[in-house]
Image: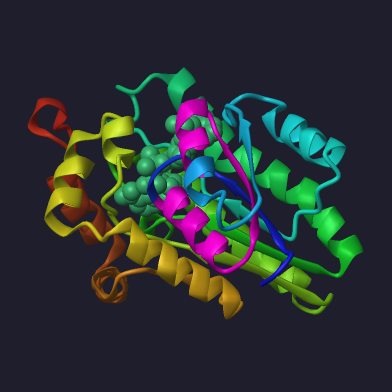
Amino acid sequence: MKNRTVLLTGASEGIGYELAKLFATNGYKLVLVARNHQKLQEVQQELGYLTDVMIIEKDLSLIDAAQQLYNEIQSSNIQIDVLVNNAGTGLQDHFHHLSAQEQLRMIQLNITTLTQLTHLFVQDMLNNGYGRIMNIGSISSFIATPSMAVYGATKAYVLSFSEALNTELRNKGDYAVTAICPGPTKTNFAKNGDMKQLGELVNLVGVRPEKVAKVAFKSLEKKKTYAIPGKRYGLLLLAAKFIPRRVLQFSIAAITLNNKHSETTLK
Ligand SMILES: NC(=O)c1ccc[n+]([C@@H]2O[C@H](COP(=O)([O-])OP(=O)(O)OC[C@H]3O[C@@H](n4cnc5c(N)ncnc54)[C@H](OP(=O)(O)O)[C@@H]3O)[C@@H](O)[C@H]2O)c1
């Protein structure tokens, strides 16, 4: 879509980088956000011949980051038509072994900043008569994930929030909110979060980030409420519906909780 501008968080690598390429080749202007300035510059250089690319270096896990980002974009007189809340981190271990501070920081990034950015930009979208929001959830939006308890809960929030907001906006004009719920994907996500078991799973069954981005882009265009990239994960979630929750939890725990910390029994 010509002359539309997309604000994309977590665009320096992984799914966000693939989404940036897709939006650029489809004629969108880009505002890209992440912490790593050098990587953002490389993306800017790569995509700059296709479209306007503005980069903003920001740690979105900090309180006030969303408001600061909004203010910076406002002061540059840029109208955001599409908001993609993609930046996210994960942590893997028993809840009580992980640091509380790190988990709260993850909640700040995966939930609070996502919500605050949406709240800030949706007001402008409503004034402008057009808006699209894409929020990146996970298959753990649907199933609680022992060993990634807080991460999974943040992603359950993302799906619930997106679905409800999509319904609220549906009758107000040309708006859509789409939650994308990928399964393990071949990015540096596991490595960046030091999640060894997820990394092994990604190596075994991971979907390519190009594929996730393609499904995400198309789903937003079609104004879908949510999408699960990769047939294998769609089927997995379908099958999971027929398994009692307690049994499902125990099965996931058996795979994900390593021996060193194994304390989970089916009670
Ligand atoms: N990969 C998977 O298996 C998988 C599965 C399901 C869902 N997801 C979700 O997909 C989204 C993207 O993940 P990915 O696989 O592409 O991960 P990734 O390769 O680790 O990329 C994450 C992106 O987010 C940025 N980011 C991380 N922390 C940030 C912060 N505090 N402030 C600003 N930017 C930050 C990173 O850039 P900087 O480091 O430069 O800040 C990077 O651009 C996440 O929301 C994740 O939860 C991933």
**Is most of the magenta stretch helix, strand or loop?**
helix
Q: Is residue 265 visible?
A: no
Please tell me which residue lies in front, 30 or 33: 30
On whether residue 166 falls in the magenta region, the answer is no
In this picture the colour scheme is rainbow
- In the image, the segment drawn in magenta is 15-43
Q: Is residue 235 above or below residue 259?
A: below
Would residue 119 appear left or right of 210 to someone viewing this image? Answer: right
- Identified at 58% across, 32% down, the residue is 108
- Identified at 57% across, 71% down, the residue is 220
On whether residue 37 falls in the magenta region, the answer is yes
Please tell me which residue lies in front, 29 or 139: 29
Q: Using the rendered view, name the quadrant where residue 70 is placed.
A: top right
Q: Is residue 62 above or below residue 13?
A: above
Residue 43 at x, y percent in the picture:
48, 42
Would residue 19 appear left or right of 132 to someone viewing this image? Answer: left
Q: Name the residue at the front extreme.
A: 49
Residue 122 at x, y percent in the picture:
79, 56
Would residue 177 appear left or right of 195 to someone viewing this image? Answer: right
- Identified at 23% across, 72% down, the residue is 232
Please tell me which residue lies in front, 244 or 56: 56
Q: Is residue 71 above or below residue 218?
A: above
